[in-house]
Structures are given as structure tokens and as C-alpha cells.
Image (tube, coloured by chain):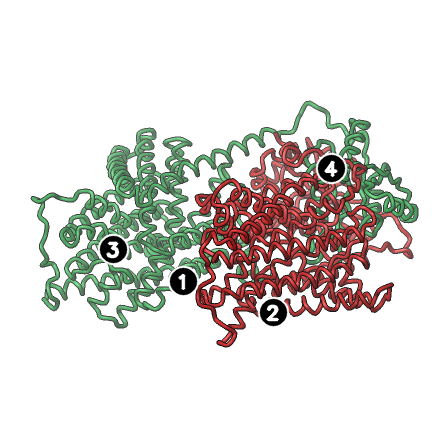
Chain colours: A green, B red
Amino acid sequence: MSLKTFLIGQPIDSVKEAHERLSKKMGLAVFSSDALSSVAYATEEMLLPLMLAGTAILHYSMPIAIAIMVLITLVAFSYMQTIRAYPSGGGAYTVSKENLGENFGLVAAAALMIDYVLTVIVSISAGVAAVTSAIPTLHTHTVLICLASLLLIVVVNLRGIRESSKIFAGPVYIFVGAIFLMVVFGVAKYHTGAVPDATGYPHETLANAVPWLLLMRAFASGCTALTGIEAVANGVPAFKPPEAKNASVTLVWMAAILGLLFIGITYNAYVFGIVPKENETVLSQLASAIFGVGPIYYLIQFSTFLILILAANTSFADFPRLSSIMARDYYLPRQLASQGDKLVYSNGIILLGVFAALLIVTFQGNTHAMIPLYTVGVFLAFTLSQTGMVVHWLKNREPWWVLGMVFNGIGALATGVVFVVVGYTKFMHGAWLVVAAIPMLIYLMVKVNKHYKSIAEQLIPDDLKPLANYKHHSVIIPVGGVHSAVVNAIKYARAISDDVVAIYVCLDTRKASITKASWDKYGMGVPLIVLDSPYRSVIEPVVDYIEEVRNIHKDGVITVILPEFVPSRWWEHLLHNQTALLLKGILLFKKGVVSTSVPFQLR
Amino acid sequence: MSLKTFLIGQPIDSVKEAHERLSKKMGLAVFSSDALSSVAYATEEMLLPLMLAGTAILHYSMPIAIAIMVLITLVAFSYMQTIRAYPSGGGAYTVSKENLGENFGLVAAAALMIDYVLTVIVSISAGVAAVTSAIPTLHTHTVLICLASLLLIVVVNLRGIRESSKIFAGPVYIFVGAIFLMVVFGVAKYHTGAVPDATGYPHETLANAVPWLLLMRAFASGCTALTGIEAVANGVPAFKPPEAKNASVTLVWMAAILGLLFIGITYNAYVFGIVPKENETVLSQLASAIFGVGPIYYLIQFSTFLILILAANTSFADFPRLSSIMARDYYLPRQLASQGDKLVYSNGIILLGVFAALLIVTFQGNTHAMIPLYTVGVFLAFTLSQTGMVVHWLKNREPWWVLGMVFNGIGALATGVVFVVVGYTKFMHGAWLVVAAIPMLIYLMVKVNKHYKSIAEQLIPDDLKPLANYKHHSVIIPVGGVHSAVVNAIKYARAISDDVVAIYVCLDTRKASITKASWDKYGMGVPLIVLDSPYRSVIEPVVDYIEEVRNIHKDGVITVILPEFVPSRWWEHLLHNQTALLLKGILLFKKGVVSTSVPFQLR
């Protein structure tokens, strides 16, 4: 308990739950860390497939980046319509379920849950890559640093961070400012001719055979820049009134900053001739090329690390919230539904932490290995959400519904196409894992749902039968000898019934007669019945005897009292009570029989 | 249950336990498989260290083999004295404990238990090596074949093989006959000049620097031939009367056969110039050199496999027997003390099987890797046992005690010296594992013993205090809502007490009022108390309430009834009863509180 208190802090009183409303400036900081942080790796991921053709098609990076920028614009406009329609927060699960039906809701939920896990591991590994780029000696400890960062996030979230959303503002604005500065300085430096032109290598022209698959892969990889863009639309109620308007403005700002930073980094990487390399990120190479390795370089690297950790952190709010909604809809175990004593969904946080840790270890904290898994689920959720919005406008015909439908339709089409492109180009590189995991997760959720529903039916109390009392209560105490724990159990048995018998299974006639002799002294008048056991089984004669009593008192109930030692150390449990445990397991399935362990505390 | 019956067979009635007494011929077969089977690998293990010096010192194999034969003679004479003194069976644990005290008994027991495990894995791996030598394509499946053989032995032993000791006679006598034939034919073939002389390579002479360490290592490795030699002395009561005399004669025969076969194989290996090689045993090379790869070769290989499997099998009788003795002396968990429904110590058999399987996988079924671990424990047990015998003669001064003391003294000295040599030369090659494991095992045994003793003291019923009944019995039912499982629990509660209350922890006032409303209908007149929980903990208010009741009725007892679902599939347990489990864990340590799960069986 004291370790828990040390790590997690004192419990928080329910009445303290207050809604802190966010200004546009604060909202931008809180909701954009996930989206903006992706510029830290999106350019690099986009360049990787292009490099498979050497330097010949590297100059396609700019057209692809522009295509992604267009996509960002379309998706942003699309989500503005979602904000208008769902001022209470329009997550992909809610929108899909309400408009496309339960099944699509489950698909969206499964895709989202997987994405939250992947956001955590991609953001942490990219953040740690920013650090190890700046301090190369740390590179061999990548996995350890990732896990330590993860643990920190888990503990902070278990403590409850609701009150401290202000901590977002600093890192986000410092990151945006630093990257913006770098982009501007880079452009200036290049155009003032302070660096040799790196773009002079021979270019493929469109006339030659264009490697369309590589370009598609580059586009698909670059689309990681869009991950997290939906966050504002999910969080509308957190804004100060007028909530929808403020959220919309924030979304526009976020999309604009995201697009500018992404295209700016890509342009600079192109003109400075920077390509991905093993142990240093593209952003780190760019920063050192523009500013040299000095204070500004370290500021960029460290603020990149911070914003990525914040991005991972957002999943620790989103995943537990979604799983609690799913649990309340009976699709996930109930343990995920309720808040703990810090007003956070502790079980969801721990579950996400465990999944993330397993994946970090599996992929050895390698960002490039995880990215192909990432985007496919994001765009599936986007597509379902936007399609759900189209159906929403058609059904409800609210003011400006045609406008909403058109924008969401374009959004759905665009994200749908990207989903197919991403799924197709990255299937063999890991996306198949996600494609396989989504139906499995849905299967589990449906299975859990069926179970809870079946139980709910079975648990409706029967109105017709009168609630008769049991006609008889027999107590049976299986004993292995006469000692304090047994005496303790007899005393309890006499408190709960007048019909108490003890039974003793005879495996050794000598021991049986010793037991019988001391029973006269300590048995408190409770009769001792000695049972034979030709096959030396202790369990069977006991169960047979219980069955006999059950047949005699058909309308009665039987309590089987098991004297149980409670050792003071855990390993001592292995030395005791094994037979009692087995017997309890068997009796669990017999109606009209209740087994009770009467504990005897040992020192 | 049906799988158990299929694998293990029907239970055996206690009264069927009959003592099958063995003739000398049968006794030799039953008790010598362990000792005689070691000639299958002893020569090879002895040659391995010699080969480290190339062929230069291979001719020392014969002098070393003669030294080992002398050792066999000394140990056999020594054990004949043990037979005379302990006609009821003189295992190293018994002899050491009775004569040298409890502590040395534990050392002997620990060494023996480790040796039984090692006998299993060494014998199985050597047996499988005989098979893979004959059928080289099986070599890649070594570990699998080892594990399959192990599983077979475990299942056979769990079925109970007491009645079938006759199965030993065939394989043992076929093996002895086949190897004897091979030795004789080999000698004949060599001396009739039918093969080129392989002994013509340049010999080191004693004049040059003698690599004493290598010779000592070869001697130590060759001493594996002695493992199992103590078996006859442990099993005296199994012989027909006069037991001691028959056992002594059997021991002499066994030692003679063992010595002859070992020296015969070593001589033939020397004259045929056979040295250990990667994937074929020395015995297999020898057999094919003498008989060619034909029927007799396959007979030798297969009977070698069989006798080694029988040798492994003897440990499955010895280990469970020793651990049941140790358990009855309260040094091992009680579960090892009692016989199962097949009159065998099932838990001991399973435990040995698990340990052996782990080690086979760890060492990948490689005999050479396991042998260095093997001999050190054997000779430690020999030394303790013989030393114990010296003390025995000194103390008891039975007829011919001086003779006994002299022979046992020589035996103790010889085995003691070998123990030091083996420990010294093999320490770095694996013997350190055993040297480390013995004290750890003793530590565990002492710990277990202390625990049982402490409990036995605490369990003596208190004679002085009158056995007063409890003054009051309160029943508390924590409920989370109104449903059939709760109704079921109320019905039970009313059967065991008149003072029943239900308590409900309010986390949500809306749900609380729903619960209160349906309570009026289904509550059977039991009052419902609603508890507040400012920190949303379900456990704490319940525990606090129980404490309150405990303070009011200081001389009473409290039953906490927990309505529990019993799902029909195991994974469904994960979806329920978590809070109840936690509560039960806490209540276990509260005196005067008994928690009872009232099961509600789901479909």
C-alpha cells in the first residue's frame, strides 16, 4: 500500500472532478501534440522507400509532400463538419456505431485501440531516436530508454494528470517555434548560397519508367504525418464556449502548422541533400546542417523528444477512455469500465502500458519497423468515421447538411483511397499484422459481449417461484487429524448450524485410532465419521459422503467447512491446503453445496 | 478423468500390495541395470580427456581402467558390510543420518536426489545416443527422442510397475550376454591377427613429462562406471531369505560382471584404435568394427538402449521413495509423502520427470555435457555412507565389527579420495553446479522443516481455555446489485444466521436508487445498508463496515457471504469475481471473520 501511495499519490475525492475548459491556445497545445509530433519522423519515413532506387527519384519527395499537404487540408475540412455535428465529441467509434451500425462501430473501435498502442510505441521510439541522434553513445541502450520513458508515462498517468494539462503548452510551442525557425533559416541559408547545391545529382524524368510502386510506398509512409489529426474533433467539449467554433478554429491552425512544418522539413531535406541513415534521424541531420551542433541543435532534439513523449501520453488518455466506453457497452471486461481512486481508468492505463512494453521489446524500439503497422489502422478509422458522417448528414438533414455531406464525402473518399494504398503497399512490411489483429479483436469483443448478455439473462431473478427457505442446513467438516485449526473450524460450525458432523478418511488404521481417541477430548460433541478409502484417495470418499447427505435432504443446503492454514509467507502456501483446494474446485459445481474455508492464522 | 484413466489405468486396491521376493538371478537383473548400463559410456568418457593430448597418452587407458576395477572391488566389499549391518536396506540417507547425524543425512539426501535426476538424463541421453549411432538420420532429433523416452518412463511409472519387475531380466541378460560376446570376439579377432595392430602409434613413456591432470580427469570420468553400484545394498529386503546372504552374492556377481565388461570394452577400444567421435558412440564403433553392421551390431545397440532406459527407470523408483521418506521426516512438502491411487508416489514421479525434462532441454540431450555433473554427487553419497558405516561399527561392535570397520574404512577412504579428484578435475566443467545445488537444496529442506515444526507447535490444541461457543454470528453480504446470484446468497445467509445484513457501496446515486427499489422486492426482508465511497473504492467501505461489526460483537464471529458466478468456461473467470477475490484475500488475515463464496452456476 505504501509503495502504491509513493508512486501514485493519495486518492482523489470524487467531488474534485472539475471541468477545466481550454482556450484555443491551450486547446491547440493539448490536442495537437500527437499530430504535430509526427513531422519528426514523417519526412524520414517518406524518403526511405524513395532511397530504394538510389538517389534517382529523391526529387519526387516534394510532389509527394504536396500531395500529403492536400490530403491534410481535405481531412481537416472534413473533421470541421464532424465538430459541427458532434459538439459532444465525435470519436470514430461513436460516429461509426451511430450511423453505420454496431458492426462498423466495432471495426472502428478495434482499429482505434490498435492505433493507440502503436501511437505509444512509435512516438516513444521516435522520441528516443531524437535523443540517441544527439547523444550517439546512448544508442545501444535504445530499448531500455524506451521502456523507462514508457514507465514514466504510465506512472504519471496513474497519478492522474487532469489538473496539469498546462504542461503541454511549453513543449508544443517550443517545438513548433524551433522547427519553424529551422525551416526559415534553412531556406535562407540555401538561397543565399551559403551551402553547395545538393540537388545536382542526375534526376529521373517522368519520361523514363517511373517506379510507381515506390512512389506509392513513399506516399503511404508520408501519410503518418496525418496521424492524430482527429484529436480536436474528439475533444470538442473541453473547449471554452462557443465550443464548436473554438475547436474549428483550433483545428484549422493545427492543420496549417502541420502542413507547413512537414513541407518545410521535406524541402530543406531535399535541398540540403539529407537522406535517412542508420543511427541519426533526418531531423537531427538537418538541424546540425543548418545550425551546427550547438545550443539550438540540442533545443530542437530535446523539444522533439518532449513533444513525442506528450504524443505517446495522449494515447494514455484516449485508450482507457475508449475501453471504458466499450466495457460499459459490454464489449470488454468490466474491470476496464470503472475509474480508480485517482479518477483515472487505472486498468486501461496498465493494459496499454503492458501491450506497449511487449511491442517495444519485440521491435527492439526500431521506429522504421513499427511505422508500417501504424498508418493502416488510422486510415481505416478515418474512412469509417467520415463515411459515418456522410450517412449522418443524409439522415438528419441539419442546416448546411449538403455542405457537410460534400466535405465529409471528399474526406471519406480521400482517406479510403489512402487506406487502400497504405494497406496494399505495406501489407508485406507489417500491415498484415494489423489486418489480422482487427478481426481477432472484434471476435474477442463479440465473444465477451455474448457472455455478458447470456449472464444478464440468467441473472434476472425468478418472479414466479416463491422464495422458500432451505428446509435443512447440514454442516460437514472433513478433517485430517485433531489440531487447533480443526478445533477452530468446529467452533465456527456450531455457530452456523445444529447439524454438524466431521468426517475422516482412513488411510492408515493406526493413525485413525489416534485421531478417534483425541476426538473425544476436543470434538465438542460433534460426531466423527470415519470413511474407508480402498484406493487411498482422500477426495472421493468425501465427495461421496456429501452426495449421500444431499440425497437425504433434497430441499436442504450443505456447508462443507474446510479448516485452512493461513501461513505468513507466500511460499508456505505451497506446503498446505492442496487437498482443500482440489475439494473446493469440485464442490464449486455442485448445486446446494457451499464450501467455506475457516482460516487459522499462523505466525 | 478419462484421460487420466487412459494413460494411468484403473486405481489399485491397497490390499493388493504384495511383496514379490526376488531370487538372486532376478535380483541381479532388477538392481544392476543402473550400474551395468554405465559401461555403455564409461570407456568413452574416460578416453575423452586422454584425447586432449592427441594419441600420445591413449595407452594409459588400460592402467586407468585397472585402477577403476580395483576401486569397484573395494566399494563392493565395503557395501557387503553395509548389507550385513542394514538388512532392512541401507541407503546413504539412512546410514548417514543414523551414524553421522541429521546434517550429514541431509547432505547425503541432497546429493542423492540430484544424482537421481542426473541418472535419468545421463542414461536417457546415452541410450538415445546408442540409437542415433545405429540410425544416424535420427541424430537431429536427439532432444525429441530423449523427451519421448522420458515421457514413456513417466507414464509407465505412474501406472505402477511393481508387478512387472520381470521385464528387467530380458534386457539386462541380453545386454550382458551381447557385450560379453563382443569382448570375447574382439580379443579373439585381434590376437588371431585378423585386424591390423592399431596400437603402433608413438607412446609417451613415463620418463617424459606425464600430464597428470589429464590422467586424473580420465580417471574421474571413468568412475562413472561405479554409479548405481549401491543399488543392491539399498534393496536387501526385496530378496528371498536369507536376504543378506543372497544380496551379498548378487553384489559380488554384479561387481564382477561390471568390472569385466568395463575392462573388456576398454581393452578392445585400445587395440582396435577406437576413439570418441562426434555422432557415434565408442561402443557402436567397436561393435561395428568387430561384427560389422549386421544383426549382432543392431542387437548390441538396441539392448544398450533398453538397459539404459531401465537404468533411468530405477531412479523413478528411488527418487520418489527417498522424497517420501524425506517428506515424512518433514524435510520436503507433504504432497510427496503419500502414495497415489496406483500405490506409487505420483507427485515424486512427476517432479522427477519435470526436472529431467528441463535438464534434457538445457543440455540438448548431450551426454558428454552432463557427465561432469554426475559423478561428484555419487561419490559424495558413497563417502558419507561408508564413513557412516565406520561409525556404525565403532558404536555397535556387532560380531565381526573390526572386519566391517576395516572394509568400510578402506571404502570410505577410496571413495573420499575419488570425490576430491572428481570435484577438483571437473569443477570448471560443470561439477560446480552440483556443488552449488547441494547447499541450496539443504537450505530449502531446513526451511521447510522449520516451517512444519513451527506449525505443529502452533497447532497443539489449547487444553486450558474452555471451548466456549461464539456469542454471536453476524452475516454480511456485500452486493453490487440485485440479481439471481444475490438472491441465492440471501437464501443461504438466512439458513445460517438470523442476523443478516446486505451492504451496497454507492458509486453512482442513480444506480443506488435502482438497487434500493428492487431490493424491496427481492431482499427477503434482509436490510440493505448503502455505504458511501468518496474515493470510488469498493473494497475499503466494505472492510470498514466489517471492522465496525467486529467491534460491536467482540466475542462473535462474522461470515461475509460473497455471491460468486461459476462460469462454464475457464476464460470467463477473467470477466468476473475480481473484486470478490481481492476482498477474500484481505479477509483471510482477519481473525473472527470467515468469508464464504456462495456459488451460482451459469450455463
Give coordinates of residue B186: x percent, y percent: 53, 52
Report the disc number at residue A145. 1
| Callouts 3 and 4 close, C-beta under 8 Å | no
Which badge, 1 or 4, is on the more N-terminal residue? 1
Disc 4 marks a residue whose amino acid type is Val
Q: Is residue B546 visible?
A: no
What is the chain letter for disc 4? A
Q: Which mark is residue B421?
A: 2
Within 10 angstroms of label 2, few (less than 14), some, or many (20 or more) residues? some
What is the distance, in whole Å, between disc 1 and disc 3 at their CAs?
22 Å
Pointer 4: what residue?
A: A594
The kind of residue on which mark 1 rests is: Ile
Q: CA distance from mark 1 to mark 4?
A: 52 Å
On whether disc 1 and disc 3 are found on a single subunit, the reply is: yes
**Disc 1 is attached to a residue of which chain?**
A
Q: Amino acid at mark 3?
A: Glu
Q: Earlier in the sequence, mark 3 or mark 4?
A: 3
The earlier-in-sequence mark between 1 and 3 is 3
Instruction: Characterize the local packing of mark 4: few (<14), some (14-19) or many (20 or more) Cα atoms within 10 angstroms.
Output: many
Circle 2: element type = helix
Where is residue A498? Give x, y as percent.
Answer: 86, 38
Label 3 sits on residue? A44
Q: Residue furthest top?
A: A464
Q: Is residue B258 visible?
A: yes
Where residue A495 sits, quadrant-wise, is top right
